[in-house]
Image (cartoon, helix red, strand yellow):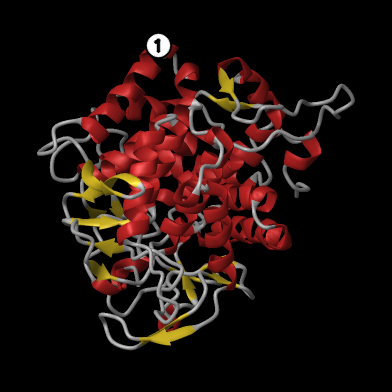
Amino acid sequence: MTVRRFAVHARAAGGLLSILLFAACTRPAATEAAATVSADTPATAAPAGAVARGTHPDLFAEAGYARAEVDARIQAAFQQLFHGDQAQQAVYYEDGGNEHGPMAYIHDVNSGDVRSEGMSYGMMIAVQLDRKAEFDAIWNWAMTHMYQDDPKHPAYGYFAWSVRTDGVPNDEMPAPDGEEYFITALYFAAQRWGDGEDLYDYRAHADRLLADVLHRAPITGATSRGPMTAVNLFDHEAKMVRFTPDQANAAHTDASYHLPAFYEVWARVGPQADRAFWSEAARVSRDYFAKAAHPRTALTPDYGNFDGTPWAASWRPESADFRYDAWRSAMNWSVDWSWWAVDPRQVEMSNRLQAFFESQGMAGYQSLYTLDGTPLGGGQTTGLVATNAVASLAADHPRRLAFVRALWELPVPSGQHRYYDGMLYLMALLHCSGDFRAWLPPGPPAARAAPERR
């Protein structure tokens, strides 16, 4: 759920050659036992993804930046956004503690609230940077103030998507992208740091959340917005993430909530009985992106129908356009290509998207568009520059490095809009440096390789 949602209801291939060319610019993988291409692999085989190769691509190295500079930039961005001046720089705020330890929240300064989106992003950033103290403090705050543990409440088993900084909900219902990032960050924490006890038994909490996401039964009950009925977060028939579990709008989706790279992780480390579903959900999301991306611009709408068409929600008709949520779609499909290399359509979509933005002028493209590319204003924003750089993980046209350099040239976001821009900026630095990794248990290559390719 993005920073600029205005209504309460608004919860509501490349070839083998290109892989070889940048192999020297990759970073070590998070997995302890890397899969390798065997000597008898046919020369025409599709490139293995980062998980199977054992390395995550370093786009900054490809663009000519020294590793020491990259590491310094990432650490400076983290220090500013997590521990900088609270009036103009930080989005991470320490907030006392309880019997489980310290607590902290990620503040959407512009909107004046705390969002499950930002909290889960904060945890993902922390686990990728080996910052366990910050990870645990955010998780403690989220479970204390955002998680719904009343079995009679329609949001039972989920996190309120928006609460005040004192923990009082603005809207008790969830935005599913928060749950998706929470779950994956917890699985990565379990692998990177090991499981602790109670609140910090990361894998147990991830398993429980993932089971509720898929299997939670419908619940009708009172909410701050009146009686509601809510269902699970993934439609079993469509095999897609919902826009909201609120039954009135549950038959819709949001392209930027589709995270096939994460579903592949769940298909490997989640509850055994559901792994086939998550593997299929990853396939369906790849197909969804191919349908939802405009045939010329590759822009996706903020909200969509399960068939890939845009959804103009009655309370927000502009949701049929490319707006703040949709900035993340290309990031999502490009990370999926980088990690798993299953669907070559993702390469073409990133090439198409970057060609469109290049045609708009690298220094001046807007942040809001109709799907066919008519500008709607918004100016150029750090968040979109960041996600367009991550699209270079899938793109194979030479222009891809211009988008990486555009990210590098930006300062760390500060001021009123530092929350959404800052979170996307820092995650993009990690993606483009090879430091945003799939932390998975060691195992034989076959257990971690991508599913059968198209």
Residue 302 x/y as whole percent: 38, 62
Which of these two is toward me, 357 or 440?
440
Residue 29 x/y as whole percent: 60, 27
Task: State the residue at coordinates (56%, 26%).
Answer: 57
Task: State the residue at coordinates (33%, 36%).
Answer: 425
Task: State the residue at coordinates (46%, 29%).
Answer: 432
In the image, is residue 265 above or below residue 51?
Answer: below
In the image, is residue 68 above or below residue 395?
Answer: above
User: From the viewer's perspective, is 415 left or right of 329?
Assistant: left
Quarter of the image where the N terminus is located: bottom left
The residue beneath circle 1 is 68
Which of these two is toward me, 13 or 38?
38
Q: Secondary structure at mark 1?
A: helix
Task: State the residue at coordinates (31%, 80%).
Answer: 314
Image-quadrant location for residue 281: bottom right
Residue 264 x/y as whole percent: 64, 49
Q: Amino acid at mark 1?
A: Ala
In the image, is residue 301 above or below residue 228?
Answer: above
User: From the viewer's perspective, is 364 left or right of 178?
Assistant: left
Q: Which residue is situated farthest in the left direction here? A: 87
